[in-house]
Image: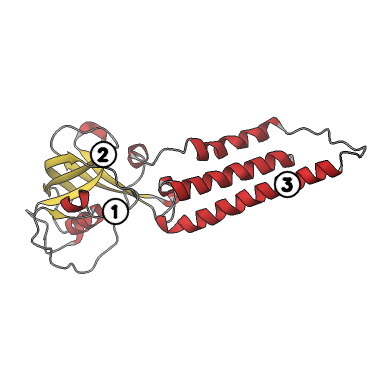
Amino acid sequence: MKRPLQALLLVLTGTGLLHTALLTDTYLRYVKAGLRPALIVSGAVLLLLGLAGAVTRDRRHTAGATGHGHDHTGTPRAAWLLLLPALSLLLNPPPALGAYTAARADTKPVAEQKGFAPLPATSPLPLTLTDFTKRVQQDRGRAVEHRTVRLTGFVTPAAGGDGWYLTRIVFSCCAADSQTVKVRVYGGETPPADTWLEVTGTWHPRGTLGTRTAEAALDARDVRPVAPPVNAYTDDLPLTPSEER
């Protein structure tokens, strides 16, 4: 690959990283929020290397203009394809992970928890999908039995049309290590895939509550659309009405 193309790739990639990390929230589609400083530093380094390479090449070209040697080698056509991902990062970032990915991923096994604190008397009770699953499958005190809970996530259609899944995709570090948390929802028609919803309901009795045989599922009483969170790749509590405003 010739130096001009190398410099152009570095400049485009660095600019794309800086634009994504400094001016938008798009970087949250790829990495956890804590890695933003690393993206900024990486983008700045790539941009500076590209600019330095372009300046050095221009000086060498000027200095050698009076010489008799000329470089007639061309850039392989395939090398120009490397411009596509760099331009994509800057102009048309890849879409966020959603129902397509979740439908093809195994559900993340929730960690074993020993002992559960009493639940507050709030109704409906806001829970994360992970906490709801733990309560259903591990809480021997059956604290969620007959409790109305409130969960938030996006829609993933279920195979066979029996209910659908409220879903969260969780990053440990970046998109490459993402894991999926799902709670099955029964009642009503399946909403469009990738729609973000707040679902209020009660545990769907299937299996023995407080054991691994219990299904992490909900009988929906109320379903309403909500705006996607800025950082969609965490399993956070639903927003309270005052926070939504």
Q: Name the residue under label 1.
A: 235
Q: Mark 2 points at which residue?
A: 155
Disc 1 marks a residue whose amino acid type is Asp
Q: Which residue corresponds to mark 3?
A: 55
Mark 1 Cα-neighbour bin, 10 Å: few <14, some 14–19, many ≥20: many
**Residue for point 52% across, 48% down:** 18
What's the amino acid at mark 3? Val
Q: Can residue 161 be seen in this view?
A: yes
Q: What element carries label 3?
A: helix
Categorize mark 3 by other alpha carbons within 10 Å: few (<14), some (14-19), many (20+). Answer: few
First in sequence: mark 2 vs mark 3: 3
Residue occupying the point 87% across, 36% down: 70
**Relative height, residue 40 to residue 71 (above, below):** below
Badge 1 element? loop
Q: Is residue 83 left or right of residue 77?
A: left
- In the displayed image of the protein, which residue is found farthest to the right? 68
Calculate the distance from the C-alpha at mark 2 to the C-alpha at mark 1.
14 Å
